[in-house]
Amino acid sequence: MAAVEDTRRNLDLDTALAEAERRYLDANPESVARHEAAKASMPGGNTRSILHYAPCPLTVVRGRGCRIQSLDGAEYIDFLGEYSAGLYGHSNPAIVAAMTAALDDGVVLGAPNLHEAKLAAELCARFPSLERVRFCNSGSEADLMALSLARAVTKRGKVLAFEEAYHGGFLIFGHGGSPLNVPFPMVMGRYNDIAATQAQIAAHGKDLAAVILEPMLGAGGCIPATPGFLEMLRRETARHGILLVFDEVITSRLSPGGLQAALGVIPDLTTLGKYLGGGSSFGAFGGRAEIMDRFDPARPDCLFHAGTFNNDVLTMAAGYAGLTEVLSPAALEALNARGDTLRAALQATFEGAGLAMTASGLGSILCIHFRPGPITRPSDLEGEDSRLKQLFHLAMLERGIYLSPRGMMALSLPMGDAEIDALLGAVAGFIEDHHPLLPTA
Ligand SMILES: Cc1ncc(COP(=O)(O)O)c(C=O)c1O
């Protein structure tokens, strides 16, 4: 309790943040030590940039259901949900059984196996745009393959993507982009800006191979595309012979057929990843047969798509078990309804406290912002004080809630009312402790 009283005395954000960091470091000495030791062999002790946060990331040693345990022995409710890949929670028994059986039959078989076509058929049955699908090892790879394919089949060079979008490690468009991006000639559009994007498509039409977008910006703040925006993109890409690519790596979980089914806008190509591998490393891209069949090895003009682990038996078995034994449409709809209820409860909490804060997202994917709503474009997030996000993150960790440093959450199937209530309680506690520091309505 003393720590909380200390915080309440702080009316200055920098001081509150410094105190929160100090308490965090004091509470997690084992994680700090492991992180420091890891620096000897990995740059900054890190091999996955998104998992780094100041002052030092927690080390997580195990997970069960929707809870994880840190190296320092503390338990957290896992609202990060591995950035949406953790939809099944940790070690779902049906998925563990399928992976164990696959392991018993041997891995690295070096041949087509019994699992891959079953998972492919299941995906094609679920997602309306998928007539054919191919597997790879990550969403990043799926996006790169989909765009490379679009450039090969259209014989055009340019790609239109959107500011603040994230399509994996080679196609990062947040915060001005990345020097590591693949050097495709890009046209950058503004998300949900119908008139400006339509003009760009008209201007670049004959050179554009693809328009790629997330039907809801994920890393860019959980901002859903408006139906009118998607309808315009579908109409205008068809008019100009451009392939429309939906990156549903995150949004595929927002309805049994992905957001494409929920919104009735069917792209030419779709990319998938995350939870669809049942918790194992996964990526997939697919779409219309006439496009995807360019990969048919029996064709004289076939395109070559490689990847030692494209049909990894563990991933294929885990993904198939997840879809057929765990993730019924009803289970997915219930999870998304839970997310909608949580989002409404968070928004009511912010409004009740007179705060200019917003819970954005759709269904089981949420993000908390220290900006007033409605948030319909990335520009609505400009001016947000990143120190508030950091303070919120540390305050949630202190209260046993594990979530992303940017305030993003992805619910998992094992979560029940107790976990949702715990999150709402933690947010209420944060507001009570720090109200004078927060933006008011
Ligand atoms: C929309 C979107 N596309 C692609 C990716 C990349 O997927 P992966 O991390 O599996 O490479 C991500 C990852 O977060 C994503 O959110």
Image (cartoon, helix red, strand yellow):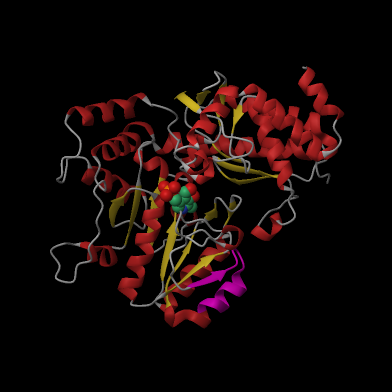
Q: In front: 15, or 259?
A: 15
- Closer-to-camera residue (116/41): 41
* Residue 150 appears in the picture as rendered: yes
Residue appearing at x 60%, y 24% in the figure? 28
Left or right: residue 320 versus residue 8 is left
Q: Is residue 27 left or right of residue 278?
A: right
Which residue sits at x=41%, y=39%? 329
Residue 258 can be seen, yes or no: no
Q: Is residue 192 above or below residue 119?
A: below
Residue 422 within the magenta-colored segment of the rendering: no
Residue 191 falls inside the magenta stretch: yes
In the rendered image, the residue lying farthest to the front is 40
236 horizontally vs 116: left or right: right
| Quarter location, residue 366 | top right
**Residue 417: image location, x then y, percent:** 58, 24
Looking at the image, which residue is at 53% across and 44% down? 50
- The quadrant where residue 170 appears: bottom left
Where is residue 51 shown, x and y percent of the image?
53, 40
Q: Position of residue 201 (x, y in %)?
A: 51, 77
Q: Which residues are magenta?
A: 186-201
The total number of labels drawn is 0
257 shown above or below 193:
above
Q: Quadrant of the N terminus?
A: top right
Task: Tell me what residue is drawn at x 16 percent, y 40 percent.
Answer: 109
Percent of width and height locating residue 68: 51, 25
